[in-house]
């Protein structure tokens, strides 16, 4: 009842109502676009390709079913994610990009522009591979140059449109637009997954107890994800008293809330995109070594699982280092007359914060990796084959939902309304 009351009061705020409705309108456009097929594609051949699931099934989950129908949004927002990863990595080694990152709004605008250019390049490369692969499988109605060109132009255009759509949601709506698009793509697969479980029970493939066990594990994982996402290590900070004119400021104790998982669900999205890119391209190359690479890195193999876990841990530390700078935090604390009890201001404080951050990030990264690879063991644990809504999807859905709720909470708090989070 409290949430319903809060929603009613939030709905009465015109500006907040517009910011909530805008993403819903954009998601409607996104879902309509997933049903607009690329011209000249044979549906029967596509159905055979996606009947095996594996890597294509994982990519189709992020695309919200757009890849299996080979719609204009077949690549979803994956090239944009890959371009963002590349730019983040280049920021560490190219001083000019690091300078742009510190220039504030102007620097972010320049980096965003370069990410857009890189997205288009990656989309063209991936679309070229997809078109040649489709021609090799006999999925193109016109296997000539015109048929190839239509696919190579149409799919990147859909990706660029989704990129623009995500930016508009971020700017005019609530939450991160790119994450919300991925969230919508995953959630749209829930009804079909539920119908699949019902079909398994009706056919006698699995029992009702197996389904209940799967649901119980899913609820437990969701609870664990929320618990870890909201976990904090509070670093106490004491501010000394200072006199300005006739007034006395400071003398208060506060804390720095360091999250156990500072990076959120970004490492999972990054690792999924990076690991999916090489085998996807390899499957489009009609060469024995390329096909062998695709089979080795296919979703669910031992090597894929190990690399997936390792990449999630790596990107968790990497993104945490990019978003949280202990030296800047230490300098800001010293600038305003604060100190951490038992630590000298400046370098000693920065080293302490860095040491604490490294230690608390390890369990957060290990948890993300464990939940992400957990679906590989679901069939053995629950007896339900082909679980499509697994750990990666749960992490993204729960993480995006929490972040969006926090942004709504912030908007409500600005207007002195009681929000969702307690």
Image (cartoon, helix red, strand yellow):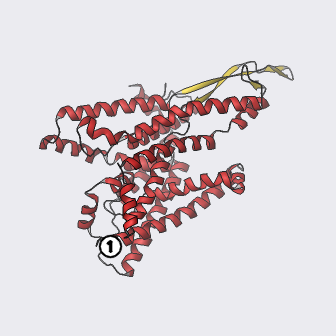
Residue depicted at x 25% and y 35%: 382
Residue 327 vertical position relative to residue 245 in the rendered view, above or below = below
Q: Is residue 351 left or right of residue 395?
A: right
Residue depicted at x 38% and y 72%: 132
| Count of numbered labels shown in the rendering | 1
Q: Quadrant of the N terminus?
A: top left
**Nearer to us in this view, 392 or 1:** 392
Q: Is residue 301 left or right of residue 170?
A: left
Q: Secondary structure at mark 1?
A: helix
Q: Is residue 309 visible?
A: yes
Q: Which residue is mark 1?
A: 136
Q: Is residue 1 left or right of residue 322?
A: left
Task: Name the quadrant containing residue 238.
Answer: top right
Picture coordinates of residue 57, whole percent (x, y) = 33, 54
Q: Is residue 308 left or right of residue 257?
A: left
Q: Is residue 74 visible?
A: no
**Nearer to us in this view, 417 or 180:** 180
Picture coordinates of residue 82, whole percent (x, y) = 51, 56
Residue 236 vertical position relative to residue 41 in the rendered view, above or below = above
Task: Name the quadrant containing residue 96.
Answer: bottom right
Picture coordinates of residue 339, whole percent (x, y) = 74, 24
**Nearer to us in this view, 109 or 289:** 289
Crowd rating for badge 1 (residues with CA inside 10 Å; few <14, some 14–19, many 20+): some
Task: Name the quadrant containing residue 219.
Answer: top left
Picture coordinates of residue 299, whole percent (x, y) = 36, 51
**Nearer to us in this view, 342 or 23:** 342
């Amino acid at each position: 009842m409290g949430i319903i009351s809060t929603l009613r009061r939030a709905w009465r705020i015109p500006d907040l109502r517009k910011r909530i409705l805008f993403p819903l309108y954009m998601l409607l456009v996104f879902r309509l676009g997933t049903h607009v097929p690329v011209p000249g594609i044979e549906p029967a051949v596509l159905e055979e390709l996606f009947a095996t699931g594996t890597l294509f099934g994982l990519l189709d989950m992020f695309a919200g079913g757009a890849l299996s129908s080979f719609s204009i949004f077949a690549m979803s927002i994956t090239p944009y994610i890959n371009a963002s990863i590349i730019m983040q990595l280049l920021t560490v080694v190219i001083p000019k990009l690091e300078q742009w990152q510190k220039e504030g709004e102007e620097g972010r605008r320049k980096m965003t522009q370069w990410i857009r250019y890189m997205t288009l390049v990656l989309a063209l490369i991936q679309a070229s591979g997809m078109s040649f692969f489709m021609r090799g499988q006999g999925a193109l109605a016109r296997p000539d140059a015109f048929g190839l060109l239509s696919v190579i132009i149409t799919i990147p255009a859909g990706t660029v449109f989704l990129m623009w759509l995500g930016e508009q949601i971020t700017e005019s709506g609530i939450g991160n637009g790119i994450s919300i698009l991925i969230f919508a793509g995953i959630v749209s697969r829930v009804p079909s997954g539920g119908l699949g479980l019902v079909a398994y029970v009706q056919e006698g493939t699995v029992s009702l107890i197996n389904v209940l066990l799967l649901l119980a594990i899913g609820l437990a994982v969701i609870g664990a994800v929320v618990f870890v996402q909201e976990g904090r290590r509070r670093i106490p900070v004491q501010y000394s008293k200072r006199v300005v004119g006739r007034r006395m400021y400071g003398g208060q104790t506060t804390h720095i809330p360091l999250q156990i998982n500072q990076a959120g669900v970004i490492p999972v999205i990054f690792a999924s995109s990076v690991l999916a890119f090489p085998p996807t391209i390899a499957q489009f190359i009609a060469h024995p070594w390329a096909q062998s690479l695709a089979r080795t890195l296919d979703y669910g193999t031992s090597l894929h699982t190990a690399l997936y876990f390792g990449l999630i841990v790596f990107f968790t530390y990497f993104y945490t280092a990019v978003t949280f700078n202990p030296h800047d935090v230490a300098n800001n604390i010293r600038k305003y007359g604060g100190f951490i009890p038992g630590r000298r201001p400046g370098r000693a404080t920065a080293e302490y914060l860095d040491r604490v951050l490294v230690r608390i990030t390890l369990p957060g990264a290990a948890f993300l990796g464990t939940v992400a690879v957990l679906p590989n063991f679901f069939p053995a644990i629950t007896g339900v084959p082909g679980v499509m809504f697994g750990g990666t999807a749960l992490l993204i859905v729960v993480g995006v939902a929490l972040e969006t709720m926090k942004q709504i909470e912030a908007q409500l708090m600005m207007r002195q309304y009681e929000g969702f989070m307690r």
